[in-house]
Amino acid sequence: MAICIAVTVAVSLTFTPALIRWFGPHIGPSPKARPDSRWARTGRLVGRHPARILVVGVTVLVLLALALPMMELSFDERAAQPPDTPSNLGLAAMAEHFPPNQTLPDYLLIRSDHDMANTRDLAVINSVSTAVAKVDGVDQVRSITQPAGERLEPASIAAQLGKLAKGLHQADRRLESGEPGLERLASGTGDLGDALDLVSAGAGKAQDGAGKLSDGSRRIAGGLGQAADRTGRAADGARRLRDGAAALAAGLRTAHDQVAQAVEGLGMIVEALEDDPICTADPICKRSREGLRKIYTGERDRLLPGLAQAAAGAQRLAAGNGRLATGLDQLAAGLRRAQSGSNRIADGQALLSEKLGELEGGTDRLATGAAGIAPGIEQLLTQTEKLRNGLDDSGDYLQAVNQRADTPEAGGFYLPASALGKPDFALARNQFLSEDGKLARIQVTGDTDPLTPAGQQRYNEVQDAAEQAMNNTRLEDSTILATGAAGLGADLAHYLAQDAVLVVLAVLLMVLLILILTLRALAAPLYLLASVVLSCAAALGLTTLMFQHLAGQDIHFTVPVIVFVLLVAVGADYNILLMSRMRESGLALDRDEVARAVTATGPVITAAGLIFASTFVALLFSPVEALAQTGFAVAAGLLLDTFIVRTLVVPACAALFEDRSWWPHRRPTRAPSALKPATTSDAHA
């Protein structure tokens, strides 16, 4: 546009004067303004009542400008097109059949200097996703930690603690099922002690009987018979002792196997907790883990070896009792054979006395050992009960932690980096994490249109929430980038706000300098510039009323700046035309001169304004909203500038200021104006 204007100025200064020189005689001079013409009457009216005219003109402009603060800028290029364009028809079809705003999501990009495919960085990304999801207007957040828009259940620490609690409760139930066997083992050990006492008593009696046999041969037959009977009973007792010892050995082995399973399960639990970094960081979980480790070490190093040793002793006891039963059977047979031969009685009784003494000593030792087994089994029952209570308490605690951690606010998230290599996460990694792992993408979908001011506000709040979530984390020094449809609008609004201030200041400063240089004054350029600004504000306010409040269309973001530049430029031109005519008479400026300037320049400025406005009126028929709004605003501004500002407001200011408009030049001495009421002294004169 600047190049076109420069070319037009060059043509006007070179080619146009030549045409006037050639065709001027055929065109003829312009007719003089008639005293009764509309512009002459307007000039006289302004000269007689400048203050009233100024108030009326400024009031009209101010009333229109009051609508300017209500202007809502639109960055939606869809609305700038007719609804029946192919792109808008496609967007409407998608909005009808698919969830809203899925086609125009926003994206957050986290750029790091290292691979973020590790557990701790994934936890930070999950925290950012959770923080963004809490922003008002956010409908769904998708990222590597929640690719479907919801938290991954396997990555929840609460779910992992739930599984651990379930395992502890299962171990508790297995120990509970083994308690009846331990109780039966304790009861069998008591019965074994009673049987051993009977065996010991029988052995002592047998030894006494054998001593008495040696006193006389007459009683040998009866004594041997009694000894044979008692020896048979002793053999039966020894066999019962053997069966009881075998049952004890089997019970101890069963208890050993069951306790070994429980210890193995407890060991797996301890190993899982030791490998868990979250448990290591949690003091309560760490103390629970140390308690479980002590229980596991005690059962592994003391309880299991004791059970194994007791089972081996019971097995040896069963074997010894079997041999004892065999010996007693042989003794009974020998006694019966002794009845048939009295010559071998003395030697047999001596041998019997010796063996019975050994039997009594061995039985006493066996009874002592059996008495020691019973307290050990009772202690095992007590420790098993304590273990069950500990496992049950640990399970209850972990379940309580599970319920408290199973919320987004708890931040319970643990996803091992190895899980990203699984087929379930392969697609999510390709979509939300770069190949080198240094760039993570978070997709944000809102419940409002991203191209509206609400969408732009949500975009900015999402960025703030993401930055706050990354503070004091491993990714604190990473860069957060944001993009998307709402981001484009937000960035345009940000830069437009900055550029608009720069453009307005630059245009006003340049126009003011040009007016100062052209009119060689300061006062007139200031109120001329103020009139230009007020005219532009009124035109934009009228545009806001027509399009935004009546037609229901927000103003396209390009309209205010373009309209401001055009109207200020054209208004400055019309100001220069009017004020240059007033300056032709020199520094003497009165109300008569103002009226003559309005009469002389009115037709020219009006014709130029109408021609310029008519060209922009054609833009009203454009289907593109931005062009239609620009055309209306410029046309309205030109008409306001032509018929109110340049016809009423500026002449009224000049009539009020008179030759003070050329300040800082000195005021010349001049005669009273014909349009100004005469003073008392003038009347007497």
Image (cartoon, rainbow, N blue to C red):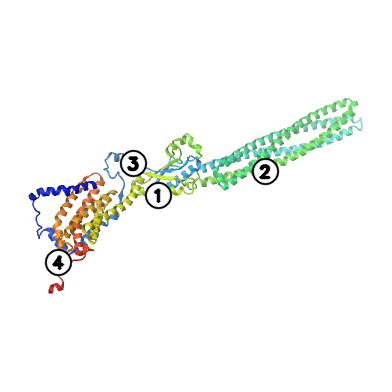
Badge 2: few (under 14), some or many (20 or more) residues near its Cα, within 10 Å?
few
Disc with the residue nearer the chain's start (3 vs 1): 3
Q: Nearer the viewer, mark 1 or mark 4?
A: 4
Going by the image, does 60 lie left or right of 165? left
Instruction: Inspect the image, locate mark 1, and give the three-letter code of the amino acid beneath it.
Output: Glu
> What number is the disc on residue 54?
none
Going by the image, does 485 lie left or right of 341? left
Residue behind mark 2: 382
Going by the image, does 190 lie left or right of 415? right
Q: Position of residue 192 (x, y in %)?
A: 74, 37
Badge 1: few (under 14), some or many (20 or more) residues near its Cα, within 10 Å?
some
Disc with the residue nearer the chain's start (4 vs 2): 2
Instruction: Inspect the image, locate mark 3, and give the three-letter code of the amino acid beneath it.
Output: Ala
Relative depth, front residue between 377 and 25:
25
Q: Position of residue 656 (x, y in %)?
A: 20, 64
Residue behind mark 4: 673
Identified at 84% across, 36% down, the residue is 205
Q: Quadrant of the C terminus?
A: bottom left
Q: Secondary structure at mark 3?
A: helix
Q: Secondary structure at mark 1?
A: helix
Identified at 43% across, 49% down, the residue is 465
Answer yes or no: is residue 558 visible. yes
Going by the image, does 24 lie left or right of 310? left
- Whether tag 4 and tag 2 are in contact, CB under 8 A, the answer is no
